[in-house]
Image (spheres, rainbow, N blue to C red):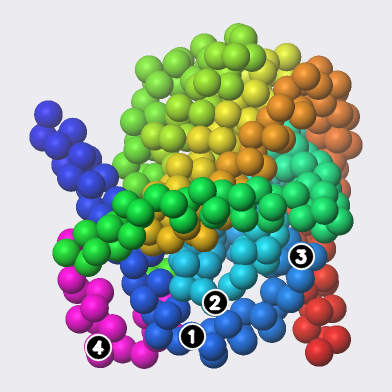
Amino acid sequence: MEARYKTSIFIILSAYFFISSIVLIKSSAVALGRSLAEALFFLVKDTTSGVFVGWLSTALLHSSGAFDSIIVAFVSAGVIPLKLAVAAILGAEVGTTVTPLTISILGYIRRRSQLSASFNVSMTHFLYNLLTLLLFYFLELSLGVFTRIAEFGRGIFVKASWLSLIPDLLELVTPWVDLLMGFIPGWLGIVLGCLILLASLWAFEHYMTATFSMPRSWNLIRATFMKPLRAFIAGFLFTVLVPSTTVMVSLLVPLAASGVIGPEHYILPYILGANIGTVFDVMMAALVTGDPAALSVWLAHLSNNLIGALIFLPFMKPFSRLVRKVSSEVSSSAWKSLLFIGTYHLIPILIISSYILRR
């Protein structure tokens, strides 16, 4: 009983510091103003650079929730425009797949059969997000589909007068942020805010994941893969509770490697549900700002995952065959696996570098 209370207290504290970190990042970004905007535009100039900055940043952070929350705070502070924020969030969807891929490769690279089995999970996650990025990138580049969705949402959220009350309420529960801003420069506030955000998300995920790591929970997770709808709902609910697609997908990697979850199970619907569930931490970050523009970024993120799910759910079987084929090829030798993960990081680095060198 005592351990349960302790876990509950730490979860509440993690949520509090997550909210506080968004307030700190936004306050610091407002204080920096134009200088921060110029620094961001040095890297994020258009849709293409935005996508790959989102990809690489999320891969380095190992958390799309953390990166998306930072972007939401920057949009609310007015230092990054909506169009570039949407592009960065599209790229972040691919960046978040790095952790399950790394676990598969580092954990099972010497055991080919287990590596191939674990790739059934991590490669499903990667290929789905890569294919949706390829589709949505061109839609966004040519038609600005998700920017239009975000702008439509902003027009609706502007009418919600209650949103402006949220920052005032948060000032009452985070008075230390204003006090801190009186003693430190804006850039240090952003650094501290990002560190607090990462730490609070890690703590929240850690204590919630402990619940799902028990044998009884493994049996529950395993039982969800018998029907596609059940897998989809489970992925959604688990990721609402543990706000990290990375964690909830990574938990499945050892199950797949040990043969508990095979290629015949409904891994894709679970991941589609998890992708939708993970937008709730971004929604919380957007609500903290009380800014319609920040909420519109969340709406674009949600739309991306909903539309992706609607497109791919009818093609579960052919998609699973593609995953098995790619997994078998990549896991056929250690050097192919290492080349794959190296290329994963190299692509965004080369594209971002080309933008920097052209200046």
Magenta span covers which residues? 173-191
The residue singled out by tag 2 in the image is 79
Asked whether the beta carbons under mark 3 and mark 2 sit within 8 Å of each other, the answer is no
Q: CA distance from mark 3 to mark 2?
A: 16 Å
Q: 62 or 162: which is nearer to us?
A: 162
The residue singled out by tag 4 in the image is 182
Q: Secondary structure at mark 2?
A: loop
Q: CA distance from mark 4 to mark 1?
A: 16 Å
Q: CA distance from mark 1 to mark 3?
A: 22 Å
The residue singled out by tag 3 in the image is 47
Quarter occupied by the C terminus? bottom right
Q: Position of residue 2 (x, y in %)?
A: 11, 35
Q: 317 or 150: which is nearer to us?
A: 150
Of marks 2 and 4, the one in the foreground: 2
The residue singled out by tag 1 in the image is 33
Q: Secondary structure at mark 3?
A: helix
